[in-house]
Amino acid sequence: MRVRIPGFNLRLTAQSGQCFRFHQQENGYLLIAHGKMLSIEEVGDGLFDLSCDQADFDAIWAHYFDLGRDYAALRQLVIEDDGYLHKALHYAQGVRILRQQPFETLIAFIISQRKSIPAISTCMAQLAARFGEVIAPGIHAFPTPQALAIADEVDLAACGLGYRLPYVRGTARMIADGRINLEAMHALDDVQLHQQLQAFPGVGAKVASCVMLFAYARMDAFPVDVWIQKVLDAEFPEGFPFERYQGVLGILQQYLFCYARHEAGRL
DNA sequence: GTCCAGGGTAAGC
DNA sequence: GCTTACCATGGA
């Protein structure tokens, strides 16, 4: 089906380091999420062809791509004063914050520590290939907590997790045996959610913030990784205006991340 | 071969 | 409370 998503930057979103299951194709991307496969192709300015029917679009993808949010309104919010922020917005304003599944996002960002984005993608693909349900020929959904909880040690190690293996397995087990319910955590406020996520092994403040932003749609989560830290140090020595941009801090953080990497020639 | 990657943990102070 | 060494692997 064909959908109009004004201003959506598919390429930047797919490579933005928030989701690791976009696979580049000849004319677009193949995305695996929510146990489904979706190919996306831009066929005109703001026009996209999706390989799904209306029912799946309404039930899954419209929500996944956060289509209910008006990203254009951000432009009026960022005043000219903020030089670097303005440039970041101009570059990255087509990036949308995806609403990913909590478990997959949690595992992805546990793996992310001291790994490059391509390396994270490779790990996630390995986990899916070895432990995920087949949803199409050669295509695997991300594994369930149960599948990773009982996974064979050798098979798990072969996914390239390195020293994060016990983190991934421990987290999967805490969810599989019901100790923590990720869906119930939607009801928590930001402070509680940030705290609860850090109960998982291998999850600190930064990873918890990523999961809040990319899986729980907490738009004020502001993950500080090495790139954002560099931006804060170099461009906001007086401090970042957190109060002024409350409500969209996470989006701005993502734009700063994309722009900083772009400037460094990494995107 | 070298360097670095969307950090967390445990030990030390 | 705040620093610091260490962590295993792949991609550039």
Image (cartoon, coloured by chain):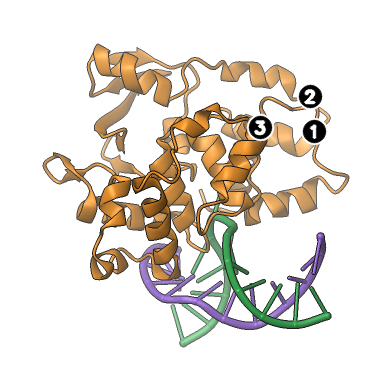
Chain colours: A orange, B green, C purple
Q: Residues within 10 Å of mark 3 (few under 14, many from 20)?
A: many
Lateral position of residue A209 relative to residue A99, left or right: right
**Do discs 3 and 2 belong to a common subunit?**
yes
Chain letter belonging to callout 3: A
**Do discs 1 and 2 belong to a common subunit?**
yes
Helix, strand, or loop for circle 3?
loop
Tell me what residue is drawn at x 41 percent, y 56 percent.
A120
In the orientation shown, which residue stands out farthest toward the right?
A238
Q: Nearer the viewer, residue A144 or A94?
A: A144
Lateral position of residue A215 relative to residue A159, left or right: right
Q: Confirm whether residue A222 shows in the render.
A: yes
**Mark 1–mark 2 CB contact (< 8 Å):** yes
The quadrant the N terminus of chain A occupies is top left
Q: Would you name the residue on which mark 1 appears?
A: A82
Give residue A22's position: percent from left, percent from top.
34, 41
Identify the mark nearer the N-term, 3 or 2: 2
The image shows residue A49, relative to residue A102, as above or below, that is above
Q: Nearer the viewer, residue A206 or A5?
A: A206
Q: Would you name the residue on which mark 2 appears?
A: A79
The image shows residue A151, relative to residue A101, as above or below, that is below
- The quarter of the picture where residue A73 lies is top right
Give residue A186's position: percent from left, percent from top.
51, 29
Label 3, label 2: how far apart the Cα atoms are = 19 Å
The image shows residue A213, relative to residue A160, as above or below, that is above
Helix, strand, or loop for circle 2?
loop
- The quarter of the picture where residue A104 lies is top left
Lateral position of residue A65 relative to residue A234, left or right: left
